[in-house]
Amino acid sequence: MGIASDLVFIIAAALFGGLIAHLCRQPLIFGYMLAGVTVGPYTGGITVENIHDIEMLAEIGVALLLFTLGLEFSFGELRRVWRIAFLATPLQILLCAVMGYVISIALGLNTHDGIWIGGAISLSSTMIVLKTLSARAGLESKTGRIMLAILIAQDVALVPIMLLLPQLTSDSVSLIPIAIAMGKSALFLFIMYFAGVYLFPRLFNIISRLGSRELFFLSTLTVAFGAGFLSHELGLSFALGAFVAGMLLSETDFNHQALSDVSTLRDLFALIFFVSVGMLFDPIFFVDHIWTIVLLTVAIVAAKAIVISSTMRLFRYNRAFSWTVGLGLAQVGEFAFVIAKAGQHSGNLSAESFSLMIAVTVVSMVATPAFFWFGEFISKGSQAEGPLETSHVIEHAVPLAGHVIIVGGGVVGQYVARVLKTFDIPYTVVENDYKTVTQMRDKNVGVVFGDASRPTILEAAGLKEARLVVVTTTNDHILPPIVEEIRRARHDVPIVVRVEEVEDIDTLSSLTVEEIVQPQLEVGLEMVRQSLLSLGIDGARVFTLLGQLRAERYEPMKTQGHGKRLA
């Protein structure tokens, strides 16, 4: 079956590895790497045959990760941390490369090996850091955003590093390849800027108006992979192109839905990436050279932590914050594999140094959660130093708090919004019809474009801080997944839902909602009220009768303990 059987082995091994990691209360990436060692070429038994093809799929995983990172990290945020991204990070890369060279020479490696190892260890792991931050709910923290800025700048620096290393280990230095690469980079950025301003918004506008989720998803992948392909054809990084496309889309109304659609596919390919990392690990080489590997890993990690934290201190961050960032980025990154392979293929990196570099990279990646823990420990012990310098803090817009989320921007949703506005109650509308979104934006209504059954969309709408969710959509088929996703994220938020058919009330009786409103029933009851009042029936008797009729229809659900009335 070729690559199909390899994927079956990888996914099955990742499942068992993930279960083992979960039972041991370790991050799932440990289990994925363990799975890679198990199905890799160095352990025997079931072995993946098409290793090169798997590595190509892993590259897609890196590209999708950076694409989603771009969707969440806008140009505005990058501008706010430009000193860190464009001044501190290049300095940090240079110092780490020099330290890596010095450590390699001290361990008896030759000059060429030292130069390539220095370049390889200068970059940190975007994949590992993002996964670790996500597991610790730290992506939106100040530390997390600063780390992201550094990682982005490091990923961009891969191109000049790959150009400079061969020049540093050759007999003669030529500036022509570097000049050509810079010209290609400028051309790529110009094309992407033009596409981001004039092409992407129009494309997604048209696709969104068609109302097809599949076409929107395909459009997102086309943009991500198309930009990656263009970047690769110009001699740049495939992942870098996807990241730039993500940043351009982050400035549009479509970023949340694009992120929601791609997240599952990203996680699948990220799994393949971590397995591919484990496949490169040679346990026999590790055992035979364990002390050299341990010594080199400790020396590199310590050197990187010192260099990065010192660089942060140079840019006026306090010691606790600087050490947290330094230790969090102390591991060797996934692009070390790319650099090491290029060095081996060019004959500038010996086979033993290549295996040594792979082992050090894997070990440092596995130890990353421990680095984060140690950084947090130091940070807690140094709180007396005072707060982080405010001149470099990333400032976010104050999110809504105590607001109402209205799912559906149709007639009913807009009516609810109008009433809430009269009471000065803040609200956010979630709508998946882009024409309606545009109309509401023109009226200065806060609205999020996307599917409310997706956690990313609900998070963008501020579900964690909401005081009430009102679901006004007329599509009863998507009500259960919407309510289930809301309850998964917030079990305590009140939910009011609208159902079109009376029979659907029974379907929703198993969901924990505070109130169900059925338009046909309410219209019927209102007509009964108007008719009885016209016949001269006492208003108090009419009110009592209507309460009994409502109870006959709505109360069976509530007596089962599934919800409670707001009124």
Image: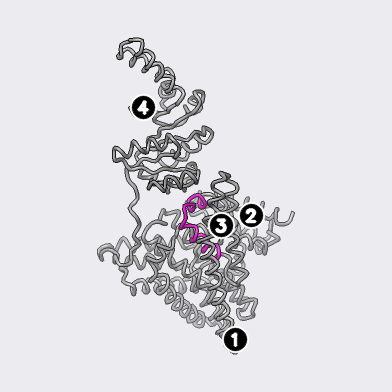
Give the CA separation, mark 3 to mark 2. 12 Å
- Please identify, in this view, whether the residue under mark 3 or under mark 4 is nearer the observer: 4
Amino acid at circle 1: Ser
Which segment did they paint magenta?
239-259
Q: Is residue 551 above or below residue 283?
A: above
Nearer to us in this view, 397 or 557: 397
What is the secondary structure assignment of the residue under circle 2? helix
- Looking at marks 1 and 2 on the same chain, the residue that comes earlier in the sequence is marked by 2
The CA span between labels 1 and 2 is: 39 Å
Looking at the rendered structure, the secondary structure element under dot 3 is: helix
Q: Which quadrant does the C terminus fall into?
A: top left
| Residue 66 is at least partly visible in this image | no
Closer to us: 265 or 10: 265
Q: Residue at x 53, y 81 (%)?
A: 115
- Give the mark nearer the N terminus: 1 vs 3: 1
Magenta-drawn stretch contains 398: no
